[in-house]
Amino acid sequence: MPLLSIPNEHGDRPEAANQRELPEAQASSSLARTLARLGREHHRHNLRVRIADFGLLELHFDQCSYRTDFPVAELPRALSARRYVVTAIGTHVDTPAPHCSENPLTDLFWIAAQQLKDEALALPEDAPLKLAQWPNFPRLPHRVEHIQLCGMLSGHPMSLREMRAHSALSPASIAAFLNAALAAGYVQRCSDDEALFAPKVVPMARGGLLQRLLNRIGF
């Protein structure tokens, strides 16, 4: 059962009796869902997660990185675990042990969001979105449609409604991509000024060789 323990004002760790359950614990939520919620919150402390049958995962928000003492390839399976303990560990970061792997925190939130493909997209359909950073796809689990959608947003801001209108992909596929990209920070909502001066998306005329080629790759 997932637990959360918080250091006291002196930085000491509390005893197990003082640990309190996370709200999702009643629903036996997966670690991926818990991380998705934690990623949306501001944290003063870094976090250590002990995952049953896998090992240690540390989230260093101040350094925008995470560490594991088990192979990163096992991370997708580890994030589906329901037996784990989350502990706040403060902002002091020790030198990683030789057997630990350290990677960008954005990667972790992307991988976690892949476990929540049916998560509802909490985003107005007409809110303009922009690609803030290309994901490092060689390092991340991804599908061809993820590259297509990043390419669509790289030219100019688009809303969810416009993405649906200009892509042959299903609404569910677009929503799943946006959930992961927004959680990792690869896609962001535009400011009012960016939205005001963004070029308008002009529908492409149907027919012709170019359109058929675009249809073949999902646009």
Image (cartoon, helix red, strand yellow):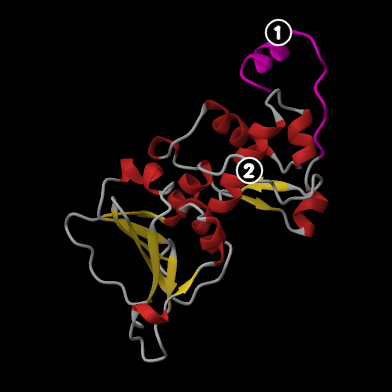
- What's the magenta bit mostly, secondary-structure-wise? loop
| 144 displayed left or right of 73 | right
The picture places residue 195, in percent across and down from the top left corner, at 78, 51
Which callout, 2 or 1, points at the residue further toward the start of the chain? 2
Between 23 and 96, the residue placed more toward the observer is 23
- Please state, as top left, top right, bottom left or bottom right, where the C terminus lies in the image: top right
Q: Nearer the viewer, mark 2 or mark 1?
A: 2
Tell me where the magenta segment starts and ends, as one range.
200-219
Eyeballing the image, is 62 above or below 162? below
The picture places residue 180, in percent across and down from the top left corner, at 56, 45
Give yes or no for residue 203 being in the magenta stretch: yes
Give the residue drawn at x 39%, y 71%: 87
Q: Secondary structure at mark 2?
A: helix
Eyeballing the image, is 78 above or below 16? above
* Mark drawn on residue 178: 2
* Mark drawn on residue 126: none
Give the residue drawn at x 28%, y 50%: 53
Quarter where residue 213 is shown? top right
Q: Amino acid at mark 2?
A: Leu
* Mark drawn on residue 209: 1
Eyeballing the image, is 79 above or below 45? above
| 87 displayed left or right of 20 | left
Quarter where residue 94 is shown? bottom left
- From this viewpoint, is residue 142 visible? yes
The crowding category of the residue bearing disc 1, from other C-alpha atoms within 10 Å (few below 14, some 14 to 19, many at least 20), is: few
Give the residue drawn at x 31%, y 45%: 72
Between 18 and 100, the residue placed more toward the observer is 18
The crowding category of the residue bearing disc 2, from other C-alpha atoms within 10 Å (few below 14, some 14 to 19, many at least 20), is: many
Between 126 and 112, the residue placed more toward the observer is 112
**Cα–Cα span, label 2 and label 1:** 29 Å
Between 4 and 210, the residue placed more toward the observer is 4
| 158 displayed left or right of 42 | right
